[in-house]
Image (cartoon, helix red, strand yellow):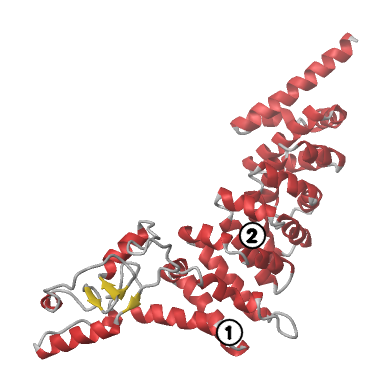
Amino acid sequence: MSTFQGVDERPCDCFYRRATKRSSEDLICVVRKRKTYDRPFIQKGLKAGNRICPRTQQVLSHTILTPNHLVREMISQWCKNRGIELSDPVLLVNEDGITESERDHFLSLLQKMSSGLPEQKEAAKELRSLTKRMPSFRALFGESIHAIPQLLSPLSEGKFEDGIHPELQEDVITTLLNLSIHDNNKKLVAESPMVIPLLIEALQSGTIQTRSNAAAALFTLSALDSNKALIGKSGALKPLIALLDEGHPLAMKDVASAIFNLCITHENKARAVRDGAVRTILKKIRNRMHVDELLAILAMLSSHPKAVEEMGELGAVPCLLRVIRETNCGRNKENCIAVLHTICLNDRTKWKEIREEENTYGTISELAQNGTSRSKRKASGILDRLNRTVNLTHTA
């Protein structure tokens, strides 16, 4: 049973009789001017996306359902007098798998996030654990517009004398990561005013686990196209690229995944190129660090003219030819030859390097025969150009 500002109802005549069939959590009644309704029906409306109070026509400030303990006690007493046993309300679980005691515990943890540092650390650590283990706890954050600001309050408001406590920061950022995994939370989390700025700040400070988890959170949030644009406009690519340049093994994969996802949009490609992505990626590929992920990003960036120009200037051609020779991964070969095809179409000065490679190793011919269908097509295109160039030279 829950209190909710909803549609006017007349008191149910069979109010007490229904207690024999359903628990005190599920009954409808009216108490004074506040309305108490069946929790399942309220939840059904909220899950359908209804956020307008049918009684006042106002947007709901939150969707947390408050148990009506007075009515519950009345029903319990009525049943007790008649020898009817009710289920323990603490054990009653709603359709999201959350008990009332768990919901109360969740709210108490959020309140602790505005307390002193010891309470904040304790609450943040528990929220991190609960949102990792229980999808239902992730969903709880979507029930109130105040939940995420409360979670972030130690980072956004509580700048301690020595700065943000690193352990507290790690737990809060990791909780954000856990929340962002829940599909229904992605838009809510990304559009909460302090989330993206605090994730960007976390990319640049804190423990390496904090920085890695901030990158992972940006990756999961960027699954939505609207979030890609929001994250890109917020300036997240520059610190992501800087973290990639540092090359810490724990963070590399998450950072590369975030950059890849963000660069799906043309605007973010331009931002990544401007912020030095091409130079950093080529450096890491030469050092044989996360070659698979970085080649995929490089292939995506090759649709941007400025990126192609930089690749040519920074020696991408011999680097990519070496990768083709050394790797056994078909996808890596495919990404390399696709980038080479684009570079060579835009810069004729690179044909000499390609021709020398082909004469020495037969790299392009081998790929044209044994690569993936896309690799064969790109390699054949390069060979055709090489042959035409040779023919033109002979004719001249």
- Residue located beneath label 1 in the image: 120
Asked whether residue 99 is in view, the answer is no
Q: CA distance from mark 1 to mark 2?
A: 27 Å
Closer to viewer: mark 1 or mark 2: 1
Q: Secondary structure at mark 1?
A: helix
Q: Position of residue 94 (x, y in %)?
A: 31, 71
Point 65% across, 55% down: residue: 231
Q: Position of residue 151 (x, y in %)?
A: 56, 75
Q: Is residue 236 left or right of residue 108?
A: right
At label 2, counting other C-alpha atoms closer than 10 Å, the crowd grade (few under 14, some 14-19, many 20 or more) is many
Point 63% across, 54% down: residue: 230
Point 59% across, 30% down: residue: 373
For the C terminus, the quadrant is: top right
Q: Quadrant of residue 380?
A: top right
Q: Position of residue 198 (x, y in %)?
A: 66, 68
* 311 over 60 or under it: above or below: above
Question: What's the amino acid at mark 1?
Answer: Gln
Question: What's the amino acid at mark 2?
Answer: Asp
Asked whether residue 341 is in view, the answer is yes
* 142 over 290 or under it: above or below: below
Q: Which mark is residue 254?
A: 2
Q: Position of residue 346 (x, y in %)?
A: 80, 29
Q: Is residue 334 left or right of residue 176?
A: right
